[in-house]
Amino acid sequence: MQTADIHSRFLSYFERRDHQIVPSASLVSDDPAIMFTIAGMVPFIPYLSGRVPAPWPRAADVQKCIRTNDIEEVGRTPRHGTFFQMAGNWSFGDYFKREAIGYAWELLTGSEADGHFGFDPQRLWVTVFTTDDEAERLWLETTDISASRIQRLGLEDNYWMTGQPGPAGPDSEIFYDLGPEYGPEGGPATGSDRYVEIWNLVFMQDEIADVRSKTEFTIVRELPSKNIDTGMGLERIAFLKQGVQNMYEIDQVRPVLDLASELSGRRYGAVHEDDVRMRVIADHIRSSLMLMGDGVTPGNDGRGYILRRLMRRSIRSMRLLGVQDATFPTLFRASRDAMVAAYPDLEQSYPRIERMAVAEEETFRSTLESGSTVLDVAIADVRKDAGNVVPGRTAFLLHDTYGFPIDLTMEIAEEAGLQVDRPTFETLMSEQRTRAKADAKSRRRQLADLSVYADLRAKGETAFLGYDELEADGEVI
Ligand code: ATP
Ligand code: MG
Ligand code: MG
Ligand code: MG
């Protein structure tokens, strides 16, 4: 079952049940406080919060998402992409738990011949919130799931909220059991990767306040108008239906992975770390393609920086596979070919995307060449003295003179079994910032008419933020 087929089965199932089909919003949200669309609910926030009346009582969509806080999982778990598509059905004050549960189960387990997904119900598990007796009862009443495969979990796992006062509520998640080769039996409550979460049903029924953390808040009242917000991972359904091992091997992603294998001459499936790299490349190229398609351009801060990181991680991964030559035009073209049917706008935007990608690759390759030599020498020196820490001064020099990002220095050092003296690096950075500010001030005094230059310098100082930034930006809500 191709991803496009899963996409259309999902939408037509809900269309037949009177849902308005809504096109995907951009990956770049209108709200400047939200860096990217990280879930299907982002474009619907005004309706879910009650600020704006929803134009339809029921809706369904397949929303493009970016989750950079999953970046470390990419290629290592079977199920985390930095880009993915979240299919959702929505009720704005219309149906509630009973229907949401019934629809999800029917679509998952109904026969393929009838337009459903045809999963074996024996493979599915469900979690509900500790106190949500109603949800558990409805699972038993509405579906044929056996009671032994329903588990209850607490606030951390099965209560949904944005971190802000407002609508919230218990949720119920559906998992697929990969089988005994993937870990011991025991259900999703074990936290084992054997159980892959495929669909999250959120029952927005509470209004919360005094939010101190994910587990400390006050439920102020039951919402007069309750909403349903669900998210089903398209790539996760695809990998399970396509009989492959993970989401990087599905039809929309695999061609790039194969190309990385072909270009490097390394067989996929031979060496675990190489496989991870190929999966990272396939994922990051697709995310970069989709981000540029939605108007993001590589840069030194904000969204542009995240895009830059994704492209740089792809280039680094290709190098770790032994490929020094430029590969972006080939890789991006393969990703476009795999994605264009679902996102026809890529046809038109592609030449612009490729130009940006090529420029980015050229710049980074020359940065890498000069910086790597310096770092290699430093690593050899540390080893000669039987040390295990790369000096902060070297990291600073690499950053300052070669534009070599600190996270990259750390990554390379780590691969060599070494650490980096980060505190010294940070001290040198902050000293440099102070100096640069003082410089800029005195220069402004001398050359008042060159203020444009001062601006540029100020921007330059924000170059190359690390993973920290990337992660902090991930889950804004
Ligand atoms: P997990 O626990 O596996 O990380 P999640 O609980 O973070 O998933 P939700 O926030 O509930 O995921 O998102 C709804 C659905 O979107 C998930 O059930 C899953 O099918 C899909 N999904 C979430 N994150 C990703 C991702 N990084 N890549 C692919 N699909 C994802
Ligand atoms: Mg997650
Ligand atoms: Mg989860
Ligand atoms: Mg979830």
Image: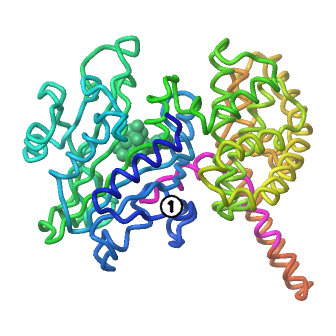
Rate crowding at label 1 as few (under 14), some (14 to 19) or many (20 or more) other CA atoms within 10 Å.
some
Question: Over which residues does the magenta segment extend?
Answer: 456-477
* Residue 236 percent across, percent down from the top left: 45, 36
Q: Which colour scheme is used?
A: rainbow
Q: Residue at x 90, y 88 (%)?
A: 449
- Mark 1 = which residue? 24
**Quadrant housing residue 122:** top left
Residue type highlighted by circle 1? Ser
Residue 422 in sight from this viewpoint: yes
465 within the magenta span: yes
* Residue 387 percent across, percent down from the top left: 73, 20
Task: Answer left or right for 242 relative to 333.
Answer: left
Whether ligand 1 has any atom under 8 Å from the Cβ at mark 1 is answered as: no
Q: Which residue is drawn at 54% across and 51% down?
A: 66
Can you tell me which quadrant of the image ligand 1 is in?
top left
- Residue situated in front as seen by the camera: 428 or 473: 473
Residue 420 in sight from this viewpoint: no
Q: Residue at x 80, y 66 (%)?
A: 436
* Residue 291 percent across, percent down from the top left: 65, 56
Q: Which residue is drawn at 68% across and 18% down?
A: 268
321, above or below 287, in the image = above
373 within the magenta span: no
Q: How many marks?
A: 1
- Residue situated in front as seen by the camera: 434 or 178: 178
- Residue situated in front as seen by the camera: 317 or 377: 317
342, above or below 35, in the image = above
177, above or below 374, in the image = above
